Amino acid sequence: MRIDVVTIFPDYLAPLELSLIGRARRAGLLDVVVHDLREATTDRHRTVDDTPYGGGAGMVMKPEPWRRALDAVLAAGPADVGRPRLLVPSPGGRVLDQAMARELASEPWLVFACGRYEGIDERVLLDAAQRFEVTPVSLGDYVLNGGEVAVLAITEAVARLLPGVVGNAESLVEESHEDGLLEYPVYTKPASWRGLDVPEVLLSGDHAAIARWRHQQRLERTATRRPDLLAPTAADDPAGLAVVPATP
Ligand code: SAM
């Protein structure tokens, strides 16, 4: 997969050189290219923002540097991808979830446009829609200072789903949100720590009993912490033991 990121803070993306993502890049599983939006400016001050039409607080990102930057990304990217996905982090976008991460993991090429200030002039998205499949995407219902943190989160959620990025692919299968349930609690050695014991069943070696216990824990944990993930019948069954996940 190829990922391009356009930002006024390229250094913000440095963590993409670390850990599993960094290793995936070095292994050639993932190609990440970070672009400085200011390289696409033409004035002495490398200006990327201006005052908002209609008044109001803050500044808005100017359209022309974005057009030039996105043109440069398209010109340097893979030639065989028709319309790459342009993800525009925005608190008003589609909220990222595991299903969206899976959807994005099947794309050959993702391009991120990181907003700052009060955001990007709306015409940039309208213009880009002629060349990209544009998707505003949100990390959740709160406001960040810029799109870079969203890029880090989305890239990590997506890249770990690519074949070979996570060493043990089985560890992806039972994770929270994969089938609509949260994961069961996990433990490691020692069996007893500060008076707290690992549940007996996990020491039993009885794999069927362990699987039943874990499934029960997933249901209970989801019903307690995230009842919104369960089917509407959850309201009639507060313990959440009889309900099925709302989304498979
Ligand atoms: N004025 C904008 C609004 O109210 O919708 C918020 C602008 S915010 C200060 C600056 C940039 O941060 C946005 O353009 C976007 O790129 C990013 N951002 C803020 N909150 C976000 C969120 N929840 N998810 C993804 N990106 C976010």
Image (cartoon, grey):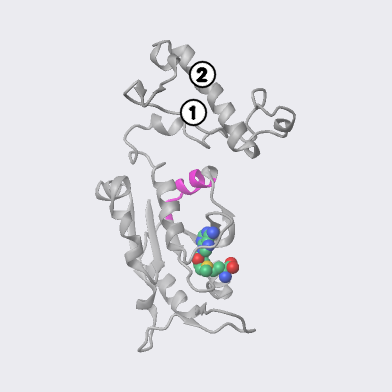
Taking the image as shown, residue 125 lies to the left or right of residue 231, namely left
**Pointer 2 or 1: first along the chain:** 1
Residue ID at (37%, 62%): 77
Q: Is residue 131 visible?
A: no
State the image coordinates of residue 211 (x, y, percent, origin top left): 48, 18
| 93 sits left or right of 192 in the view | right
Disc 2 + disc 1, Cβ < 8 Å: yes
Q: Residues in magenta?
A: 100-109
Q: Residue furthest left?
A: 26
Residue 152 seen anywhere in this rendered image of the structure: yes
Q: Which residue is mark 1?
A: 184
Residue sitting at x 58%, y 79%: 57
Q: Dot 2, how many residues are within 10 Å of its Cα: few (below 14), some (14-19), or many (20+)?
A: some
Q: Residues within 10 Å of mark 1 (few under 14, many from 20)?
A: some
Q: In the rendered structure, find residue 213 and report the number of the disc placed on it.
A: 2
Quadrant, the C terminus = top right
> Relative to 177, is 127 above or below?
below
Residue 137, magenta (yes or no):
no
